[in-house]
Amino acid sequence: MKYLDEYRDGRIAAKVVAEIRRLVTRPWTLMEVCGGQTHSIVKHGVDRLLPPEIELVHGPGCPVCVTPLEQIDKAHAIARRPGVIFTSFGDMLRVPGSRTDLLRLKSEGADVRVVYAPLDAVKLAQQHADREVVFFAIGFETTAPANALAVTQARALGVTNFSMLVSHVLVPPAITAVLQSPGNRVGGFLGPGHVCTVMGYREYEPIARHYGVPIVITGFEPIDLLDGVLRTVRLLEAGEATVDVASYQAKRDRLCDFLGAAGYDAPRPQGSYYVFPKTPIADDLAFIGRLQEEGILAVPGRGFGRAGYMRLSLTIDRESLERSLPGFARAMERVREEPAPAVF
């Protein structure tokens, strides 16, 4: 599949691993922060490709694992209440509290339902106006926007029987807790790219400076992760403690500079892994279709509440980015060559 196979290419992986082997001169312990990174590492055997000097330690990035026991017990108490439909992602059903779990409560008669998005819980509230629908809003920074959208939507629709039990947690304190723990051996971190898409990367810089550890922001595919290991090892071997987003910044600058020169309105993001240029015609969905004809994959801004814009990812490789640039220019030229719409 295009835009995916490139990040699972065994030949590229072998080259990156060979470069890691060439650079490493001593043992290093690294930690990937996010559970999604851990899943990809285990699924694709990334840890088994690395030289013996590199040890990967799995981090605290599973939101289920870091949800406080107190919040889980609150969830169970709410789920027991008559007149309540308690909704949650499926991975929370078997998480034990002090005495029980949601799956057991469901078997005992509590109305516990699995949803796949917070907006599903809002729909349930609309369908059951006589019941209070509660959504268990757990997770790191990445889940906050969807949860906020659900609350906003419920208010806009006048849904008064929808509420949330909120248990959001943050990545930087989790990293700090690891670094402050007795006997800590972690010398560098693979930071979560999706969290940085929401929050930016600035909040990691004080941690890198204070504790003297490099934090390299990565994606989730095998090549992303191996490249992150390579960049972390390079920083460790050089004795540098910084937040490494240089490759993304270079792609951001190249893309925004080119789009600006081609006539697009393309603001330069300061902490995101996406660029949101304005589409040269009002109908962003129609312009996305024109880009697809040029072999360019973009996402219409209307999906993010920004009609008339498009979302472009900076997580693609540099070669793919360079190949896409002439297509952006041709799409703009086609717009300029079209006759202006008649005004009556």
Image: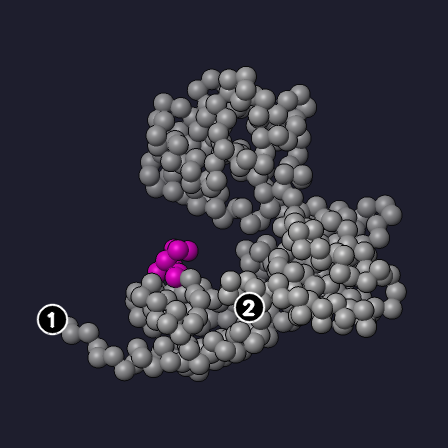
Residue 306 included in the magenta stretch of the image: yes
Specify the quadrant of the image occupied by residue 334. bottom left
Q: Is residue 154 above or below residue 175?
A: above
Query: Horizontally, is 341 left or right of 165 in the view?
Result: left
* Span shown in magenta: 300-307
Q: Is residue 319 above or below residue 4?
A: below
Callout 2: helix, strand or loop?
loop
Q: Amino acid type of disc 1?
A: Phe
Dot 1 crowding, Cα within 10 Å, few <14, some 14–19, many 20+ = few
Name the residue carrying label 1: 344
Q: Position of residue 45 (x, y in %)?
A: 71, 55
- Identity of the residue furthest to the left in this view: 344
Q: Is residue 110 above or below residue 148?
A: above
Q: Position of residue 137 (x, y in %)?
A: 53, 38
Dot 2 crowding, Cα within 10 Å, few <14, some 14–19, many 20+ = some
Q: Is residue 330 above or below residue 13?
A: below
Tell me which residue sits at (38%, 36%) in the image.
123
Name the residue carrying label 2: 316
Q: Position of residue 129 (x, y in %)?
A: 35, 26
Specify the quadrant of the image occupied by residue 63. top right
Q: Position of residue 255 (x, y in %)?
A: 50, 75
